[in-house]
Image (spheres, coloured by chain):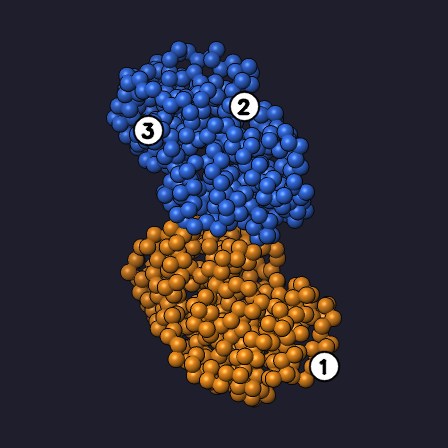
Amino acid sequence: MIDDSCMIVVGTRPEIIKMAPVIREFERQALPYVFVHCGQHYDYNMSQQFIEELELPKPDYGFEVRAYLPGLQTGKIMMRIERVVRAEKPSTVLVEGDTNGVLASGLAAVKLNVSVGHVEAGLRSFDLRMPEEHNRRLVDHLSEYLFAPTETARKNLQRESVWGQIYVTGNTVIDAVLQLMPLALEKSAVMERVRFKRFALVTAHRAENVDDLGVLSAFVEAFAEAPLPVVYPIHPRSRKRLRQQRMLGKLARAENVQLLPPLGYFDFLVLMRNCDVIITDSGGIQEEATAPNIRKPVLVIRLSTERPEAVEAAFARVVGVEKERMLKAMEQAVSEKVELPRTSPYGDGTAAKKIVGILREALG
Amino acid sequence: MKLMLVVGARPQIIKSAPIIREALKHEEIELQLVHTGQHYDFEMSKIFFQEMELPEPVVNLGVGSGTHAWQTGNMMMKLEKTMIKGRPDMVMVPGDTNSTLAGALAAVKLSLPVAHIESGARSYDMRMPEEVNRRLTDHCSSLLFTPTSSCVSNLQREGIPKQRIKLVGDTMYDALLQHLPAAAKSGVLRKLSVGRDRYGILTLHRPENVDTRETLSGIMKAMMMLTDLTVLFPIHPRTRERLAKFQLLGQLEATAHVKFAAPVGYHDMLWLVKHAKLVFTDSGGLQKEAFWLGTPCITLRDTTEWTETTRLGANILVGSNPKKIVAVARKIIGQRDIESRLQKLKNPFGDGQASRKIIAEMLRRR
């Protein structure tokens, strides 16, 4: 192929998870590539640990970008990635997702006339207050290869007449869950720590939720009064907010609630597999829950979702952020046993193989 | 309302001049004019502001030239600081330069609304950095001011909601109408000793034309073959350097009908274009200015974002093939009635009131 190699850029944990199957496919087919960590999550050591945990090779370049302002962060990453692209001269730069690092890397590449491939292209929440919405839209409009996870994503891209080629490949997150679950079950001991046999798994970390006092207290009350036990691995940001608002104690004392420290990906996979229902404001978890070896209902505690496929396939329900509505949705999830589909709307776990195949063909 | 206007390159200052003048008429608007310093020659930029009779920018970020990501990244960081300090209600970015994109990105990342001036232009050639800048700026703007109805269609085709798009006309046309009286007094024809309708004017600056020997020598060969008229070439120092490097300069200097000149100001350029027989250019703005001034244009590129002018037959895309350039130029020179025909064309770029409409919309949204 690919006499000039591809450059694969990651920057956050979700990006590493979703790019991992692509990297493994490059390895399996013995294709050359340059692996870059752009430093979007400034704690490079934590990322490095995670990369090792997933048994991926060490990045060829790794940056730490300490910047708290979005423009500063985007600008710095642009400059660094430009230097790597100029040094390595890849034929294509592959990015995944919707962070500032993804936009910065895509821009740096396209301005050097290096083509950009966007994995997970075409997602839209149509909520312009979310910085990610701008990032994904802009990256889609500068990419030459758009790897759309679903038909919905393809339609979004067609509606915007993007300039590049659209390919529906499925989402690499399904590849990742299928590949990693056996390893997770072998390595994780998290179930020994969980007090309950049946439980709801909760994650909540989005700024528009935990930074809003009204929403945060609705969460605390709904979890404490939930119709089934709640296991809540708590993100440092959410813990800080709860402590500031003097709500952490109430949650910790609730008999119904077990708080856990932030968990590794393997522990989290095992919890998803063993829970009854998932309650979350994360985007990626809505997809992971549909993998055939997880298959769990998801209550989305947000006002919108950019994953309508999970909703259409009956895996996910957008329940909003009001206490009563959350409680009612939990009761329904416990009482009504809905038969979930056996296949995921996000593909059959061959997304990475398709992506690498398309790149091989395109690059000759 | 606090309105921050971000400029950096010369064409952006031209596009902004009528907007600045209009904004200054309204006390309700606090105008924050920011210069990124993308065109790094401080003196040149100062003279240019004076020529346009504009107030000097409140902030000059002095970013200077560099690689694209370096320049854009640097501007973003500095603009972000300026925006945090200035707290504008709206950030306005004209055109398609790195300053445009940096201004738009810095603003949306701070959740400030962006208004794009000259929105919706498309060449569909993504190898041009300007095309990337235009497209991305359009897709993160909340108010898109378009110069023509085909720009409106371009945006709608890309799924941008109708209510964000405002068809106002081209502020560059406003500028032209406002500055033509001053241009008439420039005396540039005498200064450069060229006769009305007896010369063609050549401008070149795009990297794809001046950075490769083959392309540049093709264009120069065509100019040397065109003995039918004087070719006036106001030359950028960088282009001169390239000509010397590719060993084309000596030959050109020995060609009697090719006449070099130092870069000219806005007024001189308007007057030169108005009285030229022909314009040869790779610039975007000059294609429109030639059209408004009734002078036929030969564009030394394969694509254009101003298809309105090519569709009307006022502008012809020829690329860099010398034989083609000469053939098309001779054909135009041979048409006696071409100028009167061009002057009769309907102007798709508005009525010269674009800036007034833009500021009216700003006030309406206050």
Q: Secondary structure at mark 3?
A: strand
Residue under label 3: A317
Q: How many angstroms separate mark 1 from mark 3 (CA)?
A: 77 Å
Looking at numbered disc 3 in the image, what kind of residue is underneath it? Arg
Q: Is residue B302 above or below residue A345?
A: below
Mark 2, residues whose alpha carbon is within 10 Å: few (<14), some, or many (≥20)?
some
Q: Secondary structure at mark 1?
A: loop
Is residue B334 at least partly visible in the picture?
A: yes
Q: Say which mark, if any, is on residue B93.
A: none
In depth, the one of A272 and A39 nearer the eye is A272
- Chain A tint as drawn: blue
Q: Which residue is mark 1?
A: B254
- As rendered, which of B81 and B244 lies closer to the eye? B244
- For image coordinates 38% across by 27% down, the residue present is A280
- Chain that bears disc 2: A
Rendered location of residue A49, percent (x, y): 59, 27
Q: Amino acid at mark 1?
A: Ala
Q: Quadrant of the N terminus of chain B?
A: bottom left
Residue B24 vs A222, above or below: the answer is: below
Chain ID for orange: B
**Local secondary structure at mark 2:** helix
Is the residue marked by circle 1 packed among few (<14), some (14-19), or many (20+) residues within 10 Å?
A: few
Give x and y (percent) for residue B209: 62, 65
Residue B69: image x %, image y %? 58, 52
Q: Residues within 10 Å of mark 3 (few under 14, many from 20)?
A: many
Q: CA distance from mark 2 to mark 1?
A: 71 Å
